[in-house]
Amino acid sequence: MKVLVVDDDVVSRMVLMHLIDGCGQFDIVEAEDGADAWQQLEDGLRPAICFCDLRMPRLSGMQLLQRIKADAELKTMPFVLVSSATDRDTVETATQSGAAGYIVKPFAADEVRVHLLGFLDLAASGGRHQAEAPAATCARLAIDPPRLLAYLAGFQTQLTGGSGEINILLARGDQAGAHAVLRRLHDGSQTLGLDGAAAALNGLAGTALANEAAQAVLADVVRAVLQQASLVRQESGVA
């Protein structure tokens, strides 16, 4: 599976490629800036996901994202922006433009891994997670399996967004803000019957958060969402 890494800084590019390589077996393709990446995409490159620096010459990460989202063949590709910028306006602009996530430099392995979990073999995730039976969740929420799958997919998007938000909040020393994001994700886990994920998030409550620890827990929660979605499909026959 191909992963596109775009950064005009060769050191940052190599560090990110190393972290991606440590997450699993990926075919990593690199581009030296946005213009190079766009040329490769126009030439037929079709990566499963793209990690792209925000500020680059010739074509910025935001400009590349806008081109990708306007292209019928490319618009569904997850696009993760990478930057040293930690202001909320930049994050909100990236999200509104369709970015699947936002990672702040310097990189941490779990911040990268959380965006790759959907492409990894679920069997390698280290065992079953604790969760309510999908049928029980459907009955409690008065929904059918397809709707539960939609909720799980939406929650996964919230988790990746929350990962980037926590990254930025902690970089600014905003412990209260980061805890507020975790409480919101905890409530989502509880609502969807992800008992183990909710317990893991609750375990961070009231602690002095370290970004690495928070990202590791969020990666586990994403894994729980993916496993639960797989279980829903198995039990209901929904594609």
Image (spheres, helix red, strand yellow):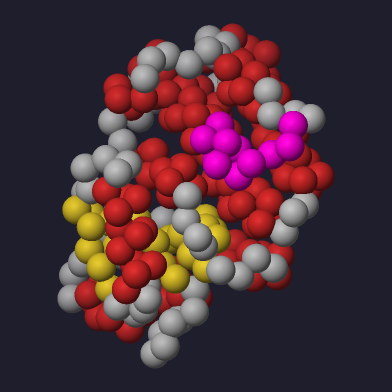
Find residue 57 and report its image quarter: bottom left
Query: Does the rendering let one see residue 46?
Result: no
Find residue 135 and report its image quarter: top right
Q: Position of residue 65 (x, y in %)?
A: 45, 71
- Please report the residue visible at 48 percent of the width from the left and 65 percent of the height from the top: 82
- Does residue 204 show up magenta in the picture? no
Asked whether, in this view, residue 115 is left or right of residue 199, the answer is left
Asked whether, in this view, residue 90 is left or right of residue 82, the answer is right
Q: Position of residue 140 (x, y in %)?
A: 67, 13
196 above or below 106?
A: above
Query: Does the rendering let one see residue 28?
Result: yes
The foreground one among 80 and 68 is 80
- Please report the residue visible at 28 percent of the width from the left and 73 percent of the height from the top: 31
The foreground one among 218 and 139 is 218
Q: Quadrant of the C terminus?
A: top left
62 above or below 20?
A: below
Q: Position of residue 147 (x, y in %)?
A: 55, 30
Number of marks: 0
The foreground one among 124 and 206 is 206
Q: Position of residue 148 (x, y in %)?
A: 55, 27
Asked whether, in this view, residue 170 is left or right of residue 13, the answer is right
Helix, strand or loop for the magenta stretch, by majority: helix
167 above or below 120?
A: below
- Please report the residue visible at 70 percent of the width from the left and 24 percent of the height from the top: 202
- Does residue 208 show up magenta in the picture? yes
Q: Which residues are magenta?
A: 207-217
- Please report the residue visible at 51 percent of the width from the left and 62 percent of the height from the top: 105
80 above or below 175?
A: below
